[in-house]
Amino acid sequence: MPAAPVPPSIRAYQLSDWPRLCDIHDRARLDELRRSAGVEAFRSLARTAHSEGLFDGRLDVAEVDGVVRGFVAFQRGSLNWLYVDPDSYRQGVGRALLRHAVALSGPVVSTQALEGNEPAIGLYRSEGFVEIERRRGRLAGCDEFAAVGVILQWRR
């Protein structure tokens, strides 16, 4: 029987984490887009971080064995970014980051996932988020690509 995954430790983002965040985002974002709007809509983290508000609120990372495995960016009431290294999928990293952000975000937390990204939607639902709306529109930073956003909300 394989050993249980080591639970991640969560800490504040440091500038030295930037290359690792870029790697995590860019690889995981391609997985997300394969399930939704298509990989042609891909834009790197280096290109989108500032325009899409990565640093607008709190940014924390999850480490396992001293290696950053995922990150979450959030503000009071809003979970804006949650990405996990594809090599660490289904090992508790995303769940730990989600629980961390929810615990620090207030009594109501909203987030959005792209329609078709069932792994993310399933994670949110398993932690008590409920779908409140589906919104058709254009991807942020990629206006030429249509997508459907699944708006989810969690209440204390």
Image: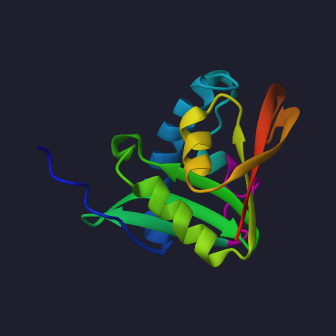
Q: What residue sits 58% from the left and 24% below the top?
A: 34
Q: Residue 60: x, y in percent? A: 53, 70
Q: Residue at x 66, y 26 (%)?
A: 36
- 128 sits to left or right of 65: right
Task: Tell which of 133 and 46 is nearer to you.
Answer: 133
Residues rendered magenta in the picture: 48-57
Looking at the picture, tell me which residue is in the foreground, 152 or 68: 152
Closest to the observer, 156 or 106: 156
Q: Is residue 55 magenta?
A: yes
Q: Residue at x 39, y 43 (%)?
A: 89
Quadrant where the C terminus sits is bottom right
Classified by dominant secondary structure, the portion drawn in magenta counts as loop
- The quadrant holding residue 38 is top right
26 lies above or below 108: above
Give residue 10's position: percent from left, percent from top: 43, 72
Q: Is residue 117 above or below residue 87?
A: above
Q: Is residue 90 visible?
A: yes
Whether residue 19 appears in this view of the structure is: no
User: Could you say where residue 83 lies in the image, as x and y percent from the top left?
Assistant: 53, 50
User: Which quadrant of the figure contains the N terminus?
Assistant: top left
Residue 70: in magenta span: no
Residue at the far left: name it. Answer: 1
Q: Compared to 131, does 104 lie above or below?
A: below
Residue 137 pos. (x, y %):
88, 33
| Residue 2 shown left or right of residue 150 in the figure | left
**Quadrant position of residue 106:** bottom right
Please state if 61 lies on the left or on the right of 88 as rendered.
Answer: right
Is 154 left, or right, of 136 in this rendering?
A: left
